[in-house]
Amino acid sequence: MSLLRTLWGFVKRAGSALRSLFSAAFDFIRQLILTFFEGPLGAFERVVKKARDALSHALEVLRQGWLRIWQRAPTTPRDKRPTPGRQGLPLLAGTATTTIWYLIPLDDALTLNAPRFLAAFAATWVVTLLAFRSAMRRQPIGRIGTLLVSAQHRVGLLWLERFALLMVCAGLFLISDEPRAAPALLALAIGFLTLLASDYPDRGLTDALPEAVTPLEPSQPGVPRETTEFSDDEDVELRTFRWSVPLATRSEALDVTVAIDTERFQTMASLNPKRPTGGSYPDWTPWVISGSTDEVVRAAQEIRKVTDTRGFSRFDEAAAVLGFAQSVPYSLDIESTGDEEYWRYPIETMYEQTGDCEDLSILAASVLRELGHHVLPMVTHDHAAIGISAPVGLPGTYVDYEGHRYYYCETTASGSRIGQLPPDVNPAELKFCPLRNE
């Protein structure tokens, strides 16, 4: 028994060493790619950035896949986990893919021997889709986009575009001396993704791996506060907001209608101090927390209702709130209020349906807080935005503040994703303005 315990201890230490090795290797490659693409990018800036993000994202999936192999975290109850056979099928698919591909003479691909080459390539993708079908628990083979959406809901990643998979395949062909090995590596990447997806719950953003920076957990269950009903003698006006939110492999059109008490709007507007205190580090608390009226709660309730109906993850829900704020038309304070600087309460922004960067950021922050998300306001000398706490590993721009990771959210650019930094915003200039009583 002592010998077995010694051997078991050795295996555990070896596994830990391999896990650390693979993690360090993938981190190094990822940082190398990011460093390589830094600097002037010229006319190809947008294409190169998209390729860089796709490769970076794919490497992160691979890294977490390796960690997942060596460290099983109890994210779901044992009686609800997939059977060992289902977990092993993606790796079996990778082996089968390798076998199929190596049966093709390289000359067939180079000379475009179309029938045999295309038949083998089709067989490769059939095996890969079967792996997805198994991991997604009896879903039809169908379109790969549908399966990627299901994987995204479980893993909670920012996006899983087919473009990213194609970039991985193309990149492997470019760096490999033996092109026929590339599909095998791609199949393994997909296999690791299915292992991740099959072990996560269908809802939520559970972080299965211990990270140096711990993400904040949303409040449980993150249900907006109760609101009071309008009486018959109250003057109420409706405001409808329509927008499209970019998700993993598709965009979703959303719309919500918010009832606004006009008397409360007038009262809040008359009490508005217009400018915050704190100088270059303005205090957002009076607007985001104290200014969160029943109208903010109703907006949060409506967004929660529509996102729950469509099966959004918590991360998708946050993206929906960001799109909600982005749907408000932008205007400068001097144009809409006559004042050089005027910070609107959320009820003012929704009622007037206009605002500038700080107004839209305040609105987004207030609704996100009602839904249980944690936010960090931030400013530069001429701009305002917010950060939202999310699990480590998501692609995009983030800041580490007091032991937590916040991803940048641009509220003035329609269609901008969580973590997407505008080219005219220098992250080194961001100043953090944490809310009081958080």
Image (tube, rainbow, N blue to C red):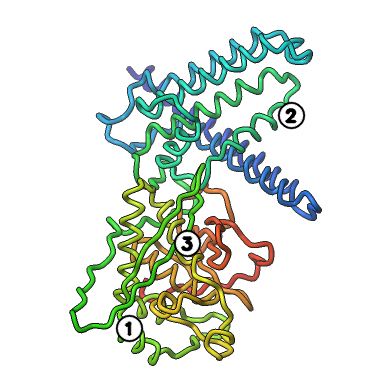
Mark 2 crowdedness (10 Å alpha carbons): few <14, some 14-19, many ≥20: few
Mark 1 crowdedness (10 Å alpha carbons): few <14, some 14-19, many ≥20: some
Compute the Cα span from label 1 to label 3. Answer: 25 Å
Compute the Cα span from label 1 to label 2. Answer: 63 Å
**Position of 208 compared to 410: left or right?**
left
Identify the residue shown where x is 34% and y is 89%: 267
Mark 1 or mark 3: whose residue is earlier in sequence: 1
Identify the residue shown where x is 51% and y is 77%: 355
User: Which residue in the protein does label 1 denote?
Assistant: 262
Please state which of residues 62 and 270 is positioned toward the viewer in this rendering. 270
Point out the image quarter for the N terminus: top left
Q: Mark 2: which amino acid? A: Ile
- Image coordinates for residue 351, horizontal then vertical, percent: 40, 78
Label 3's element?
A: helix
Q: Mark 3: which amino acid? A: Leu
- Image coordinates for residue 399, horizontal then vertical, percent: 55, 61
User: Which residue in the protein does label 2 denote?
Assistant: 175
- Image coordinates for residue 98, horizontal then vertical, percent: 59, 15
Residue 322 badge: 3
Number of marks in the rendered image: 3
Mark 3 crowdedness (10 Å alpha carbons): few <14, some 14-19, many ≥20: many
Picture layout, residue 125 above or below residue 297:
above
Q: Nearer the viewer, mark 1 or mark 2?
A: 1
Label 1's element?
A: helix
Mark 3 or mark 2: whose residue is earlier in sequence: 2
Q: Mark 1: which amino acid? A: Thr
Residues at badges 1 and 2 in contact (C-beta under 8 Å)? no
Please state which of residues 389 and 308 is positioned toward the viewer in this rendering. 308
Locate residue 110: give its quadrant. Answer: top right
Mark 1 or mark 2: whose residue is earlier in sequence: 2
Identify the residue shown where x is 66% and y is 35%: 167
